[in-house]
């Protein structure tokens, strides 16, 4: 499996066996009065997942391959990949403030990736059960409009991933009033920084949890 980080909450997951591609939460450049300064995602995929209908998560206009767009709960299989959408919320008030959010699991090459979208609360036991085994966790770490430090730790402890990849944090191309990735990394062990924007991951994952910080491509 290959994982490419475009920036913000947008990734491309490429299955090794059949080459099926999934793009998650593609953003709209210059949305939110220019706060999102990542460039347009001009790529191809068979599937696009959208966790919620906000401009920094729902723009697939640059994806030219006419993908199947998933933005609802439920399970879908496509080309040897299994995708499952689990209902959660963008806030701690059951969606009253920012609406619903869909957590997606993507299983390919015997590896399960979990993309949390803009999760805004600790997971319930029912949600944890529906998510199931997680090998790689794509988790928002900027706080403010997503889970805070205590909830981040709770989610990580609940899902017990082998690899954690932070997303949705402040950079020179994201002007939101949220924290940068260093605030999340402070005091944590097993951190690896990658200069590349795309990495390959084998199913023989490490026993100890590692944190992969991937360089955005856009």
Image (tube, grey):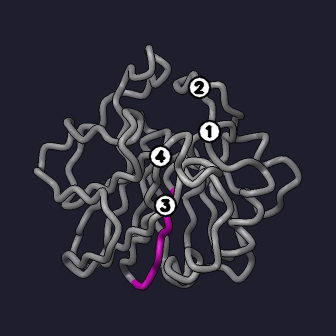
Q: Residues within 10 Å of mark 4 (few under 14, many from 20)?
A: some
Query: In the rendered image, which residue does mark 2 sit on?
Result: 176
Identify the mark at residue 115; answer none if there is no mark.
3
Per the picture, the main secondary structure of the magenta-coloured stretch is strand
Identify the mark at residue 145; answer none if there is no mark.
1
Please provide the residue range marked out in magenta: 110-116
Q: Nearer the viewer, mark 1 or mark 4?
A: 4
Residue depicted at 37% across the width and 61% down the height? 13
Mark pair 2, 4: CA separation: 19 Å
Mark pair 3, 4: CA separation: 17 Å
Q: How many marks?
A: 4
Asked if the residues shown at circle 2 and circle 1 are in contact, with their CB atoms under 8 angstroms apart, the answer is yes
Determine if the magenta segment contains residue 111.
Answer: yes
Query: In the rendered image, which residue does mark 4 sit on?
Result: 99
Mark pair 2, 1: CA separation: 10 Å
Determine if the magenta segment contains residue 100.
Answer: no
On the picture, is 4 further left or further right than 166?
A: left
Q: Nearer the viewer, mark 1 or mark 3?
A: 1
Q: Nearer the viewer, mark 2 or mark 1?
A: 1
Q: Residues within 10 Å of mark 1 (few under 14, many from 20)?
A: some
Residue depicted at 20% across the width and 43% down the height? 63
Residue depicted at 39% across the width and 20% down the height? 30
Mark pair 1, 3: CA separation: 16 Å
The answer to whether one can see residue 40 in this image is yes
Q: Position of residue 167 (x, y in %)?
A: 57, 47
């Amino acid at each position: 499996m290959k994982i490419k980080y475009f920036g913000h909450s947008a990734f491309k997951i490429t299955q090794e066996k059949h080459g099926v591609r999934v793009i998650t939460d593609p953003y709209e450049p210059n949305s939110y009065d220019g706060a999102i300064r990542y460039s347009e995602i001009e790529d191809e995929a068979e599937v696009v997942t959208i966790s919620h209908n906000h401009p920094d998560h729902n723009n697939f206009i640059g994806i030219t391959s006419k993908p199947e767009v998933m933005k609802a709960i439920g399970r879908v299989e496509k080309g040897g990949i299994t995708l499952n959408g689990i209902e959660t919320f963008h806030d701690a008030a059951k969606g009253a403030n920012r609406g619903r959010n869909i957590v997606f699991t993507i299983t390919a090459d015997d590896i399960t990736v979990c993309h949390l979208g803009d999760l805004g609360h600790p997971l319930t036991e029912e949600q944890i059960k529906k998510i199931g085994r997680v090998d790689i966790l794509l988790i928002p770490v900027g706080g403010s409009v997503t889970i805070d430090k205590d909830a981040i730790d709770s989610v990580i402890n609940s899902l017990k991933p082998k690899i954690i990849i932070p997303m949705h944090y402040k950079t020179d191309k994201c002007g939101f009033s949220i924290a940068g990735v260093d605030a999340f990394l402070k005091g944590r062990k097993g951190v690896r920084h990658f200069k590349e924007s795309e990495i390959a991951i084998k199913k023989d994952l490490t026993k100890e949890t590692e944190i992969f910080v991937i360089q955005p491509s856009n």
